């Protein structure tokens, strides 16, 4: 009876979290480009940082992305002199994505960033880009042109050295793999404990089975997500593959999980996979952003 009560509470919790997480996701789904720029040894004075895209700015779109990113009060709080200094420092043949309108292509971005982290996202993130930094005292720096080799990338600016670097492409795959696999392990590990299994005696079969099944699936999806983002066609592969893995893991847990009945091991395998499949879709993005922002 206690086990049944726990299972009911767990199911209710999963459904509640799924509902809450699904609401914002439905607003604008599908793959979107993203670039996170992390500033180290940043200026000790106010500064603005923006992305540059090839092409001359179009005057009719000058305030387009500013209005896209800032409410009226936030827009009024921008430093007009610093904003103009940034615009004046843009090299010929380039367009400042936020400060000069990005030629009418919408992009989410903040000139000031948060804690040295500047996130640019949405369809207006350029494939070939430069980073520009302008300080309140008038110091200006513009990076060399860089190219995004994946849908979601990161770059690091060392302000003291006036350099910019990007992780190797293989690192993007590694980060995305962990962002895909780690949430699965955490979710299924917590559910393992809720089902009454002791970690001391269960961790070996749990990790072995998950790394073989979920690890292989995460590797496959990581490669696709890095290159193309999460496309809807992946769902047609995701659902049947998760069903196969859920059944396989349930049978493997029935064989190798000890300390509880075989029926409970099967129910655990099916429940854990359902939870990780649903919640993992929503956690992979935030986990990836956290890892990139702090690496």
Image (tube, helix red, strand yellow):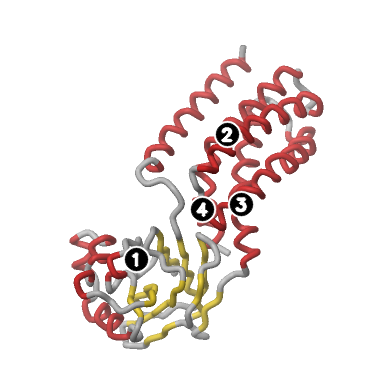
Is mark 3 in CB contact (under 8 Å) with mark 1?
no
Whole-Å distance between the Cαs marked 4 and 1?
23 Å
SS at mark 2 in the image = helix
Q: Residue at point 52% right, 73% down?
A: 156
Horizontal side, residue 24 vs residue 84: left or right: right
Q: Residue at point 38% right, 40% down?
A: 26
- Give me the disc on residue 239: 2
Quarter of the image with the N terminus in it: top right
Q: Where is residue 161 in the image (x, y as percent from the top left)?
A: 52, 85
Q: Can residue 114 be seen in this view?
A: no
Horizontal side, residue 208 vs residue 245: left or right: right
Mark 4 Cα shell of 10 Å, populated few (<14), some (14-19), many (≥20): many
Q: In which quarter of the image is residue 24?
A: top left
Residue identified by numbered label 3: 222
Q: Where is residue 202 in the image (x, y as percent from the top left)?
A: 77, 33
Q: In which quarter of the image is residue 121?
A: bottom left
Whole-Å distance between the Cαs marked 2 and 1?
37 Å
Mark 2 Cα shell of 10 Å, populated few (<14), some (14-19), many (≥20): few
Whole-Å distance between the Cαs marked 3 and 4?
9 Å
Q: Is residue 10 visible?
A: yes
Q: Residue at point 55% right, 37% down?
A: 236
- Give me the disc on residue 229: 4
Report the mark closest to the observer, 3 or 1.
Answer: 3
Label 2 vs 1, first from the N-terminus = 1
Report the mark closest to the observer, 4 or 1.
Answer: 4
């Amino acid at each position: 009876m206690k086990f049944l009560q726990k299972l009911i509470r767990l199911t209710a919790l999963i459904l509640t979290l799924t509902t809450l997480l699904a609401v914002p996701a439905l607003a604008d789904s599908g793959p979107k480009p993203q670039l996170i720029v992390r500033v180290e040894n940043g200026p000790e004075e106010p500064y603005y940082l923006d992305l540059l895209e090839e092409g001359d700015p179009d005057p009719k779109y000058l305030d387009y992305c500013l209005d896209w990113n800032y409410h009226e009060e936030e827009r009024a709080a921008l430093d007009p002199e610093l904003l103009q200094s940034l615009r004046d420092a843009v090299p010929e043949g380039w367009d400042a994505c936020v400060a000069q309108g990005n030629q009418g292509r919408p992009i989410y971005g903040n000139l000031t960033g948060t804690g040295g982290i500047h996130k640019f996202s949405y369809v207006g993130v350029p494939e070939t880009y430069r980073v520009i930094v302008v300080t309140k005292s008038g110091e200006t720096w513009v990076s060399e042109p860089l190219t995004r080799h994946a849908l979601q990338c990161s770059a690091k600016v060392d302000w003291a050295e006036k350099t910019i670097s990007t992780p190797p492409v293989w690192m993007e795959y590694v980060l995305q793999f962990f962002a895909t696999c780690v949430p699965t392990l955490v979710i299924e590990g917590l559910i393992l404990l809720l089902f009454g299994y002791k970690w001391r005696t269960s961790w070996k079969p749990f990790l072995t089975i998950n790394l073989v099944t979920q690890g292989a699936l995460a590797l496959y999806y990581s490669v696709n997500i890095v290159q193309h983002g999460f496309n809807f066609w992946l769902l047609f592969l995701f659902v049947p593959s998760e069903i196969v893995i859920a059944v396989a893991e349930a049978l493997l847990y029935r064989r190798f999980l000890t300390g509880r009945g075989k029926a409970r091991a099967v129910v655990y395998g099916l429940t854990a996979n359902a939870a990780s499949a649903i919640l993992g879709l929503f956690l992979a993005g935030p986990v990836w952003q956290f890892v990139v922002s702090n690496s």
